[in-house]
């Protein structure tokens, strides 16, 4: 039940943090993306077709390092597609928030459009906690369902 | 105009109910999906290419029954596509809410990604009412614009 | 930081204005779409592959005129695709809002599905201001990344 201003503030802050992650990341501002995590936040990435192979980073600088490596690989692939623009746009929807007293769970879907169309998609599973007036990601687990091309 | 905390609570509750419908349904928890409706809620499904053929269920148990039949048919089709994962992910966006004193109207788009890509899409037209501290679906009309494959 | 009821009211009003733009536009109610702008609001359209060619309208009636011309052209194209339904559905996601005391910035992605599938996509960059109890578009800059077909 959503019954108080505190609930609304928490939910809007969570929604804003989730939007900020891709708003920064899609523009290549990986340091800013990392600030959507708590200082000791955890990011996990796995692919549905290879679920035992989990990339995991703990802390903001490890997250930056992991994503920069990931983006570098992705860009290389993308640049081999003639005429493909190098942008990525994460379409994030369906955010479902379960709010507890000291943490929240959120689940969202993402689909990524690039210069060659629908590129990959999957889901985020998040744990968020209050941190210095915001709700930040304590954990984000990314599962990529599929990658085309 | 959105002018009060009551408006905000109603809108956030409506958004949460709409998210909960697919959050439950995409995981196969049809009973939980049905609880996003009032006990006498109505679900209607129609296809744009066959608008006279309307499936209609009244009440939660009838909704469960209708959707279980629908999912069973869909899964059979999907399983004929080699290598296709059996997940469905409803990407719901554009929710437009018109709030009245005792009911609300909401309109949203959905697009469904499965293991073989963009599968079908369409729109929801909803009527929601306050019910035991939440805003639940009194009516949801689903129109499927197109189904690929 | 999102810290007050005023922040929440502004953000929800902004989200509602952004939803109303496409809710009206996708149904062909261009006059209603124009009312999501302030009376002297500005709409700019540009394509990623032709960034120097900017269409720009200032004021609601100029916006109506520009969009009616745009829709007329688009419909002609669409009607040449046999069997294609004439609807357009803008899937808008990822809205990131930065709220200042007297104006706000918002950035969103859009992807358009029509009767022949994923048609085009891009992004909105908006400036919104308070106007008669709502937050309306003072400027919307539309960039179309790509158009298929």
Image (spheres, coloured by chain):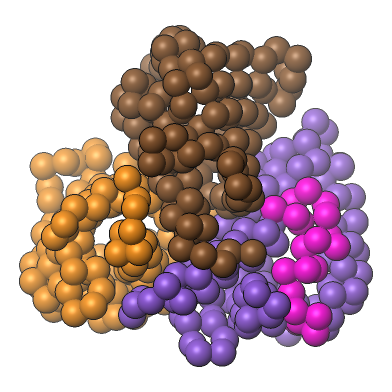
Chain colours: A brown, B purple, C orange
Q: Quadrant of residue B122?
A: bottom right
Question: Residue drawn at (51%, 65%), measured in percent from left and top?
Answer: A4
Q: Does residue A84 lie above or below A92 as drawn?
A: above
Indicate left or right for C111 with C35 as reference: right
Q: Does residue A89 lie above or below C44 as drawn?
A: above
Q: Does residue B102 lie above or below A6 as drawn?
A: below
Q: Position of residue B49 (x, y in %)?
A: 67, 73
- Magenta region: which residues? B23-42
Q: Nearer the viewer, residue A83 or A64?
A: A64
> Does residue A41 show up?
yes
Q: Is residue B24 magenta?
A: yes
Residue farthest along the bottom direction in this orientation: B101
Indicate left or right for A37 with B71 as reference: left
Indicate left or right for C31 with B25 as reference: left
Q: Does residue A29 lie above or below C5 as drawn?
A: above
Q: Position of residue B2 (x, y in %)?
A: 36, 76
Question: Residue drawn at (72%, 69%), measured in percent from left and top?
Answer: B36
Q: Quadrant of residue C8?
A: bottom left
Q: Position of residue A115 (x, y in %)?
A: 39, 32
Quarter holding the N terminus of chain A is: bottom right
Q: Position of residue B25 (x, y in %)?
A: 76, 56
Indicate left or right for A82 with C6 as reference: right
Question: Residue drawn at (25%, 40%), measured in percent from left and top?
Answer: C48
Q: Is residue C67 magenta?
A: no
> Does residue C111 show up?
no
Quarter holding the C terminus of chain A is: top right
Q: How many marks?
A: 0
Question: Residue drawn at (48%, 57%), measured in percent from left and top?
Answer: A6
């Amino acid at each position: 039940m959503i019954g108080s201003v505190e609930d609304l503030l928490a939910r809007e802050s969570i929604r804003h943090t989730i939007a900020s992650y891709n708003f920064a990341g899609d523009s290549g501002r990986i340091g800013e993306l990392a600030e959507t995590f708590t200082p000791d936040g955890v990011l996990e990435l796995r692919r549905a077709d290879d679920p035992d192979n989990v990339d995991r980073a703990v802390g903001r600088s490890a997250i930056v390092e992991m994503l920069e490596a990931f983006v570098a690989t992705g860009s290389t692939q993308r640049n081999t597609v003639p005429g493909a623009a190098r942008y990525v746009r994460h379409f994030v929807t369906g955010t479902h928030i379960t709010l507890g007293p000291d943490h929240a769970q959120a689940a969202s879907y993402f689909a990524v459009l690039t210069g060659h169309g629908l590129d990959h998609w999957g889901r985020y599973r998040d744990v968020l906690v209050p941190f210095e007036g915001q709700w930040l990601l304590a954990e984000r687990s990314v599962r990529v369902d599929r990658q085309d091309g």
